[in-house]
């Protein structure tokens, strides 16, 4: 599976150095999708470990329904089978969970035990549209979580199905999708967009710093008119740089 991934592990580490909005800024230059609505979460997420910074990994997916006890009876080997699926996918991995109980959250898939198990299996964190618990212990395990809320119990937490398409926070995720996530939310990168992503994000960050931000920060002692003139010139240069780099038409 690693041979089908266009980014090296070193490339993933470099992606992790940037926040998710910066990754979006590069992504919108190389995607053929709609940057106003595609790829990122449409519902609000909550990052329970913002001090860990961004997380980057490939999606492994699972569906749960903690309110329903029948799943344990229908597949008593579900946990073992699910863990073997998880172990068979190369990391780094982000566990994306669709909770069928939402918007009412009945129980958590996550806690001290499951976060440590998944960390051992190469997972760096989770995006779950359900809940988490044992927040301090999950922090201790180094397992990052974007979730809807916290809760006390696990109820009938059991993997219902896995390695399938899921929907979380208004975004569809396929197994193997590349995900970048932090306190702002998350973005899902399609395979054909991954190879050019790092270079695009770096370029757009440097483009901002050398044009618009430099013009704004260097405005001390200038009149309001002079500031606006400088920013207008910087905006033109910013757009020209992006057009020349990415050879695309658009709002720039």
Image (spheres, rainbow, N blue to C red):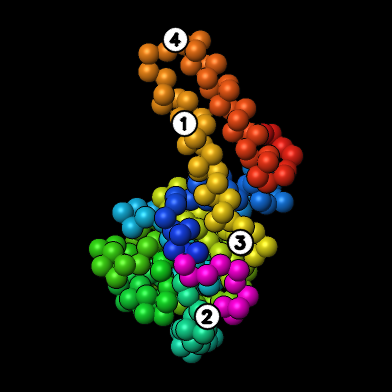
Between the residue at mark 4 and the residue at mark 2, the CA separation in whole angstroms equals: 58 Å
Circle nearer the N terminus (4, 2): 2
Along the line of sight, which residue is nearer the eye, 17 or 42?
17
Circle on res. 213: 1
Q: In the rendered structure, which segment of residues is drawn in magenta?
A: 1-10
Of circles 1 and 2, the one toward us is 1
Of circles 3 and 2, the one toward us is 3
Residue under label 2: 89
Residues at marks 1 and 3 touching, judged by CB atoms closer than 8 Å: no
Q: Position of residue 244 (x, y in %)?
A: 68, 41
Residue under label 3: 194
Between the residue at mark 1 and the residue at mark 4, the CA separation in whole angstroms equals: 17 Å
Q: Residue at x 54, y 39 (%)?
A: 207
Between the residue at mark 1 and the residue at mark 2, the CA separation in whole angstroms equals: 42 Å
Circle nearer the N terminus (1, 4): 1
In the visual, does 67 lie left or right of 3? left
Between the residue at mark 1 and the residue at mark 3, the CA separation in whole angstroms equals: 27 Å
**Relative height, residue 94 to residue 248 (above, below):** below
Q: Tell me which corner region of the image, top left, top right, bottom left or bottom right, holds residue 120.
A: bottom left
Q: Position of residue 95 (x, y in %)?
A: 48, 69
Residues at marks 3 and 2 touching, judged by CB atoms closer than 8 Å: no
Of circles 3 and 4, the one toward us is 4
Of circles 1 and 3, the one toward us is 1
Between the residue at mark 3 and the residue at mark 4, the CA separation in whole angstroms equals: 44 Å
**Is the residue marked by circle 2 packed among few (<14), some (14-19), or many (20+) residues within 10 Å?**
some
Circle on res. 223: 4
Circle nearer the N terminus (3, 4): 3
């Amino acid at each position: 599976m690693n041979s089908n991934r266009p980014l090296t592990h070193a490339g993933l580490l470099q992606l992790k150095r940037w926040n998710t909005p910066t990754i979006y800024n590069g992504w919108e230059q190389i995607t053929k999708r709609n940057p106003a609505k595609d790829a990122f979460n449409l519902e609000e997420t909550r990052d329970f470990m913002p001090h860990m910074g961004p997380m980057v990994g490939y999606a492994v997916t699972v569906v749960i329904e903690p309110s329903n006890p029948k799943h344990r009876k229908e597949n008593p080997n579900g946990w073992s089978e699910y863990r073997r699926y998880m172990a068979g996918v190369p990391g780094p991995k982000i566990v994306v969970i669709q909770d069928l109980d939402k918007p009412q959250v009945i129980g958590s898939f996550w806690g001290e035990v499951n976060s440590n198990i998944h960390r051992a299996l190469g997972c760096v964190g989770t995006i779950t549209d359900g809940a988490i618990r044992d927040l301090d212990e999950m922090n201790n395990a180094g397992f990052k979580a974007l979730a809807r809320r916290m809760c006390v119990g696990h109820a009938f937490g059991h993997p219902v199905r896995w390695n399938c398409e899921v929907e979380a926070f208004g975004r569809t995720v396929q197994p193997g999708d590349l995900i970048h996530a932090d306190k702002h939310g998350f973005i899902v990168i399609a395979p054909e967009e991954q190879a050019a992503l790092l270079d695009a994000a770096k370029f757009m960050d440097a483009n901002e710093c050398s044009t618009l931000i430099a013009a704004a920060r260097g405005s001390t002692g200038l009149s309001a008119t002079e500031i606006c003139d400088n920013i207008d010139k910087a905006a033109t240069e910013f757009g020209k740089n992006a057009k020349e780099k990415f050879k695309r038409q658009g709002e720039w």
